[in-house]
Amino acid sequence: ASSLVDGVDTADAAAGTNDVSIEYNAAAKLAYDVWRKQYPPPLKASQRVLLSAEEVAAGGGIDPAKFATFERNYEIVTVANIRAKRAARMYGGEAEIVTLGSDADTVALPLPPSFVPDTGTSVDAADVSIQYNAPARLAYDEWLAANGRVGEEFDDVKFGTFEQNYVAVSVANTSAKKAARDAGESADTA
């Protein structure tokens, strides 16, 4: 028999199958759901029916090719917006935000030149990995900007010291939040 205890299925927990992983493209899937509500496809009268359980399990009537196009466009727009916001934060001014239009699942956006590697490799072979210390690097950039040190040449030694402090504070904050949550209190963070 299975029951929920604190939101965890006891049968899954006993079997060691309580999977809490997040799909790599969860953000794109959530954005696609929001986008589809904003731009619903035109339906014929005969198509205005509820999806069966099998259809929902198979992706909720989502066309995989259309989602693949949307996902690619979503990634391009997301990276462009992050870069624009970072440039605005670092150099002042307004970030020019790009949005996806009604054809985002049918028309592929062209790749910006900065996305195309200059190593002669194909676009599909481009490295889109995120550095393991990206949160610390973003926090360091924000710290530089907050302290009037924008445009300062990057210093590996200073960043290394900042990163050690950032990790220590992050671990302390996370531990405090967990302890407070376990005790039913609110956590104070540094």
Image: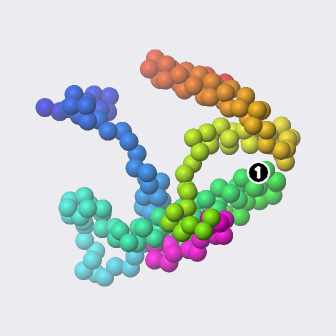
Residue in view at x 51 percent, y 20 percent? 180
Comparing 125 with 17, the one in front is 125
Q: In which quarter of the image is residue 83?
A: bottom right
Could you tell me residue 35's position as x and y percent? Answer: 47, 65
Picture coordinates of residue 172, whole percent (x, y): 59, 22
Say which residue label 1 marks.
89
Vertical order, 63 against 132 (above or below) = below
Confirm whether residue 190 shows in the render: yes
Left or right, 177 with reference to 30: right
Within the magenta stretch, is there residue 167? Answer: no
- Going by the numbered disc 1, the residue's amino acid type is Arg
Q: Position of residue 9 (x, y in %)?
A: 25, 33
Give the quadrant of residue 10.
Answer: top left
Please name the predominant secondary structure of the magenta segment in the image: loop
Give the number of marks. Answer: 1
Q: Is residue 49 left or right of residue 95?
A: left
Q: What stretch is highlighted in magenta?
A: 103-118
| Residue appearing at x 46%, y 17% in the figure | 183
